[in-house]
Amino acid sequence: MLTGATGTGKELVARALHELSPVAARRFAVCNCSAIVETLFESELFGHVKGAFTGATQDRMGLFEYAQGGTVFLDEIADMPLTTQSKLLRVVQNQEFQRVGSPELRKVDVRVIAATHRDMRGLVAQNLFREDLYYRLTMVELKLPRLAEHKEDLPLLERHFVQRFAHNYGKRIGGISRRAQAVLARHGWPGNVREMENVLGHACMMADAEFIDVRDLPDYLRDATHGAAAKEPDLMPLANLERRYTQHVLERVGGNKLQAAQVLGISRATLYRILRDGAAEPGGALVDFLASGAAPCAA
C-alpha cells in the first residue's frame, strides 16, 4: 500500500517497485479506481464472458488476467465499491477469480500494489473499506512525504523538469536563475511534485532567454513573493541583498564596474552575473543602465 498526498508520485513509486522486482520483464497493469463506473468494476478487473450482461458481445479478459505473472497497480483504491472489495480480497488471499458470468475458477499470479491519498484507517472505522482487505494490502505500507518535507530534492527535480520541457518545446534553456530558485524554495508546494511539474512546464513555455527567471513563473508565485516582501521589507532572500549592495557600490563608484568588482572582492564576470539576474526586477532599469557602462547622472 502506497499512501501520500495527491501529487507525491505514488504511481512512479509503484512503477519503480515493479521495475526493481523479479517480474520486471512482465506486464505492469494500471487501474484508476476513481475513473471506473461502479457497475463495470468487476468486469474491468476480472473480465467477463459473452452474454454476461447487455453489451457483452464477446469474451473479455480483465486486468488481473492481463497482468498474469506481473504487477497490478490499483490507484485510488479507496474509491473501490465494497462489493468489488470482497472479490478483490479473494484474489489476494487465494490467487483465483471468476470472470463475470462464468462459474470457472481461474488461477492468477500477480503482485498487487494499491495507492490512495485518503485516510484508510478512518474509512475502515466508518465501514467504507473492508478491514480484512485493508490489513491484507498493508502488509507492507509506504508513506510518501510531501514535497515540503524533502526540499533538498528541489534542485534535482528542477533540473529534471527543465531538461524535459526544454526538449519537448525545442528550446535551449540552461537552467533557472538564482532568484527564481529562491522563489521556488520559499513556496510551500501544496500540490507537491505535480504542482512543480506544472510550474516548470509553464516557465519553460514562457521563457525567452537561456535561463528561467522570476518573470517566467506563474502569477501566483510572483504575487506571493511580492506580498511577503511588502509585509516584512527587512526580510529578503540573500540573493536580493547581494544585488542591492552591489548596486549601492556601483552608484558610489560612479558606475565603474572594474572598481566596483575590486571593492566587492569579486570578478567582473560575477559582477555581470549579479547585474544580469537583477535586470528584470523592480528597479531593473537602473541595473540595465549601470550594466551598460555609462556613468549615472548627478541628481
Image (tube, grey):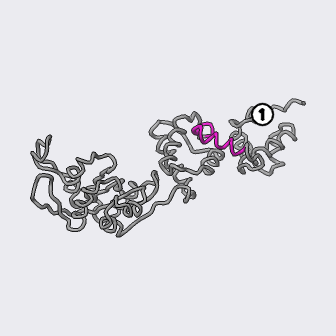
Instruction: Estimate the x, y position of residue 98 in percent, counting from the top left.
Output: 15, 58
**Toward which corner of the image does residue 99 lie, by quadrant?**
bottom left
Identity of the residue drawn at 32% across and 46% down: 35
Residue 277 visible in the shown view: yes
Res 211 seen here: no
Q: Residue placed at 84% from the left, 48% from the top? A: 263
Q: Would you place residue 280 above or below residue 131 in this image?
A: above
The amino acid type, in three-letter code, at marker 1 is Leu
> Please, which residue is most extreme toward the front here?
126
Quadrant location of the N terminus in the rendered image: bottom left
Magenta-colored stretch includes residue 218: yes
Q: Which residues are magenta?
A: 213-229
Q: Is residue 35 above or below residue 206?
A: below
Q: Inspect the magenta stretch and tell me whether residue 136 lies in it.
A: no
Helix, strand or loop for disc 1: helix
Residue at (87, 40) in percent of width and height: 253
**Label tally:** 1
Task: Locate residue 12: give its quadrant.
Answer: bottom left
| Residue most extreme to the right | 299
Left or right of 56, for residue 64: right
Predominant SS along the magenta part: helix
Pick the residue in front: 111 or 160: 111
Residue placed under numbered mark 1 in the picture: 286
Spot occupied by residue 246 in the image (x, y as percentages of width and height): 79, 44
Taking depth in this image into account, of 298 and 60 the one nearest to the observer is 60
Location of the C terminus by quadrant is top right
Residue at x 22% of width, y 61% of height: 69
Q: Residues within 10 Å of mark 1 (few under 14, many from 20)?
A: some
